[in-house]
Image (cartoon, grey):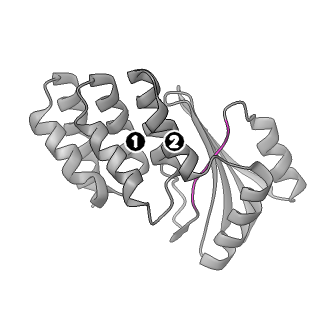
Amino acid sequence: MTEAMPNPHRGDRLVLPEGATAQEVHTFAEGAGFKEGRENRTEFVLEKVWIVSGQLYFHYVDDAATGVAYVRFTGDKREHVERFTELARTFFSPIGVDNLMVAVREASTPEARAHAIVRLATGLPGEPPPEGLGMIEEAFVSSDAGVRRGALLSALYLDWPIVRSWVVHMERHDEQETLRLQARYFIDKNEAAS
């Protein structure tokens, strides 16, 4: 999910291992001396934001709908975002992109594959590896509607220019009306924001 903070620099989303708790994140933020900021809660998503300093923020997002939790830093200075991202990477031992891609390859059921695709998209760095993007693109045209739905959910975590053609293709050609309608909604939302 995208954060509402108007900061030009966004650190990589660090996908937390399954079983990581909000308390661990709170302990990290408190131990680092971050000031509690806002909390956004919807039916499925919890986002907590701490103020690190000035225009530097620490985000924790737990998305129950996709089963993905991650942390990230945003801020006005790239070097600060990168430095604090590395600090969090050391503390949390997030799931690396290579392991996220392995999870996609090794998924034994469509449900597991859909879940792995969303986790992969969440954890892709700003300059995503072509293999990771290829896995997501393949999911958009999977023979399984659940995997295609996972692909559409994964688009929430990727830059619109990367996924636009995949979502447009789904909206025009998917055999499932529900997915076509969801893709249309996603297109409308992103085109309006452009």
Query: Which quadrant of the structure image shows residue 160?
Result: bottom left
- The magenta-colored residue range is 12-17
Q: Which numbered circle lies on residue 154?
A: 1
| 91 part of magenta stretch | no
Residue neighbourhood size for the residue with mark 1, other residues' Cα within 10 Å, grouped as few (<14), some (14–19), many (≥20): many
Can the viewer see residue 77?
Answer: no
Query: Which quadrant of the structure image shows residue 89?
Result: bottom right
* Relative depth, front residue between 4 and 136: 136
Q: Position of residue 94 (x, y in %)?
A: 68, 48
Query: Which quadrant of the structure image shows residue 7?
Result: bottom right
Element assignment for label 2: helix
Q: Is residue 170 above or below residue 108?
A: below
Q: Residue at x 16, y 23 (%)?
A: 177
Q: Position of residue 97 (x, y in %)?
A: 54, 52
- The C terminus appears in which quarter of the rendering? bottom left
Q: Position of residue 38 (x, y in %)?
A: 67, 48
Q: Earlier in the sequence, mark 1 or mark 2?
A: 2
| 14 part of magenta stretch | yes
Q: Residue at x 66, y 32 (%)?
A: 18
